[in-house]
Amino acid sequence: MANATEHLFGNFSERWQSQTPARPWYGQGGELVGPHEWPRRHMETPPQEYQLTYFVTRIATDLDSACDPTEPVVVYFAGLGFSTSTVPSLKKYLSERIAKLRKLSEEHSLPPFLLVAPVRRSGTWWCIDSDELNWGWLGDYMPQEVALLNDFILHVSHTGEDRRREVAALGFSAGAYCITELLGSNGVAFRAVALGGVHGHGVPDPVRAGIPVRRRPGVETKWTAYLARIAQLATATPVCAVHARTDTLCPFENATTLLDVLKERNAAGGGVFIHLVSVAPTSRDKSCHAYEDHLWTKEVFVFLLRPPQQAFLSSARSHRGMRPRGTLGTVHLVHQRAGVEEALSIWCLH
C-alpha cells in the first residue's frame, strides 16, 4: 500500500513542499492559474506517460485569507463546445465564469473552495476514443482515461498532510457523462455532483436516435455496458441533474434511464438524490442542449458545497407538495436567468 500511495502522491508532495508561501499552487488573490501540466506514468507494459493540463483558482469572499486544508475542491468538466475545446478558449471561458462565481460567493456567502478545470485530452470525448462533436459518444470506452482522471483528482485534493479535501464535480454534456463514469469507477468519493445535459455511452435505440446506419453496430451493447458500469457506484453520492425534456442531442428518456440507475444505487446506500429539470430552454438554442447558465448558479453551487438537505431546503422557494420520506416528491424552484424567471422542477428522493 505504501508503494501505491507513493505512486499517487510522491511527485505532488515534492511540488507542494517546493511552493513558497507567497505563491501556492492554486495562485493568490483569486487569480486563475494555468495551464499547469500534470504527468502521470501508468504501470503498463511498457509503461506509458499521460499528460494532463488543467487550470485552478480559489473562490473566496476574502481572497487574502489563508486557504484552509478543509476547503473543498470543485472539479469542472467541460463539454465539447467550441468555447472550451482549446486551452486558450477554456481559459477565456473560465475567466468569465469565475467573475460571476466571485459575485455569487459575495452575495450568498458561499464557503471558500478551489475550482479545478482539467483540459479534455485531444482526440477524446473525455473517456471515449473520439472527439467527434455529434457522434463522439459512439466511440470505444477508455478505462485508462478514467483511471488517469481519478489519479488527477486524488492528486489535487491531497493537502500534503496525509489527508484529502472533499471533492465535488460539475460537468456539461460530455463532461457530465465523464462524471458518471468516475462515479461508477469508485476511484473518488464525491461529496456531490451536478450534471448538465448528461449523455450516456451509446444509446438504447439507435434508429430513434437518428444514428446513421453505418454507425449503428454495437451501439446498444455499449449502452448496456455503460449502465452496468455506473451501477457499480458504491458510495451514496448526491446528484443534481439539469435536463430539458425537449433536448434533441441527448433525449430526456435516455438521461432519466441512466439517472435512475444512479438513484437506485444512492437509495441502496441511504443517500439523497436530487433531479433538477429545466422546463424552459432558451429560444436561441434549437437543440435545447444549452445548460451552462443553469449550472453556474447559486442553487447548484450551494448544492455542491453545503450538506445536501441544507442545500435543498435553502434553494427551494416553496416546499408544498413534498410527500412522505422515501417517496418521490416535487418542489418548484425559480431563478433569474438573463433577467427572465425560469421555472425548474426538482424531484427529490429523500
Image: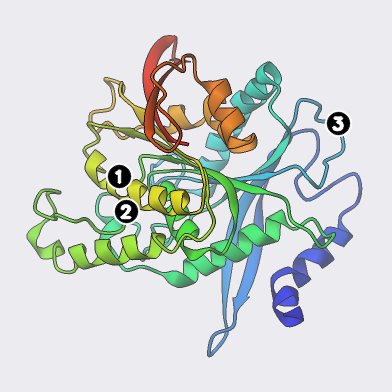
Q: Is residue 297 visible?
A: no
* Residue drawn at the location 18% of the way across and 69% of the way down: 218
Q: Dot 2 lies on which element?
A: loop
Quarter residue 202 falls in = bottom left
Q: Earlier in the sequence, mark 3 or mark 1?
A: 3
> In which image quadrant can residue 290 be found?
top left
**Residue that badge 1 annotates:** 255
Name the one closer to the observer, 6 or 54. 6
> Considering depth in this image, is 114 or 305 the residue closer to the camera?
305
- The amino acid beneath tag 3 is Asp
Residue 185 % position (x, y): 49, 65
Query: Where is residue 30 drawn, in percent x and y?
Result: 75, 34
Q: Which residue is mark 3?
A: 64
| Disc 1, SS | helix
- Badges 3 and 2: C-beta atoms under 8 Å apart? no
The residue nearer to you, when weighing 172 against 119, is 172
337 lies left or right of 281:
right
The label shown at residue 193 is none
The Cα–Cα distance between marks 2 and 1, rounded to whole angstroms, is 7 Å
**Looking at the image, is 310 positioned above or below residue 46?**
above
Mark 2 or mark 1, which has the lower sequence index?
A: 2
CA–CA distance between discs 3 and 1? 42 Å
Which residue is depicted at the point 78% across and 50% down? 25
On the image, the x and y values in percent for residue 338 come to 44, 14
Residue at 67% over, 16% down: 107
The residue that disc 2 covers is: 200
Label 1 crowd (10 A; few <14 / some 14-19 / many >=20): many
The answer to whether mark 3 and mark 1 are in CB contact below 8 A is no
Residue 220 in view of the camera: yes
For the N terminus, the image quarter is bottom right
Q: How many marks?
A: 3
